[in-house]
Amino acid sequence: MQERPVLIRADYGTVALRLKELMEERGITRNQLAKLIDARFEVVSKWYQGNVEKMDLDILARICYALDCSVAELLVYVPGKGMEGK
């Protein structure tokens, strides 16, 4: 397996949240989800908009429980282009 150090400037991809899509499929609003998982609306709204910088695993578990989904359904890895300049 080839080493791929993270310290080299590279487009290694991102992790995208699919919360908005899952909530729309289930007909759940941000207010409803906030009540279901006992979290502030602002917290749910950040997740909904995909603006989470540091993932709170407790919130992640509560969302998965409330929406009856797996982590893999909620988070999607989007590969990058690799090393810059190549």
Image (spheres, helix red, strand yellow):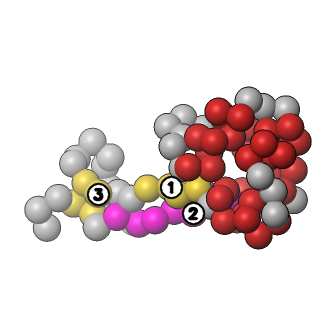
Query: Which residue is identified by label 1?
Result: 15
Instruction: Identify the residue at the far left of this view.
Output: 85
What is the distance, in whole Å, between disc 1 and disc 3 at their CAs? 12 Å
The reply to whether discs 1 and 3 touch (Cβ–Cβ < 8 Å) is no
Q: As shown in the figure, which amino acid type bears the numbered disc 3?
A: Asp
Per the image, the residue denoted by label 3 is 11
Q: Quadrant of residue 68?
A: bottom right
Q: Quadrant of residue 79?
A: bottom left
Q: Amino acid at mark 1?
A: Val
Name the residue that disc number 2 marks.
76
Left or right? Give the position of 25 relative to 82.
right
> Do the residues under discs 2 and 1 have CB atoms within 8 angstroms?
yes
The residue lying at 51 percent from left, 43 percent from top is 51
Q: Earlier in the sequence, mark 2 or mark 1?
A: 1
x, y (%) of residue 59?
Answer: 74, 38
Residue 82 placed where, x, y %?
27, 63
Q: Residues within 10 Å of mark 1 (few under 14, many from 20)?
A: few
Q: Decide which of 18, 45 is in the foreground and name it.
A: 45
Vertical order, 67 against 63 (above or below): below
| Image-based side of 1 in relation to 27, left or right | left
* Residue 49 among those drawn in magenta: no
Q: Determine the CA span between mark 2 and mark 1.
A: 6 Å
| Residue occupying image coordinates x 69% and y 40% | 44
Residue 77 sits inside the magenta stretch = yes
The residue range painted magenta reads: 74-80
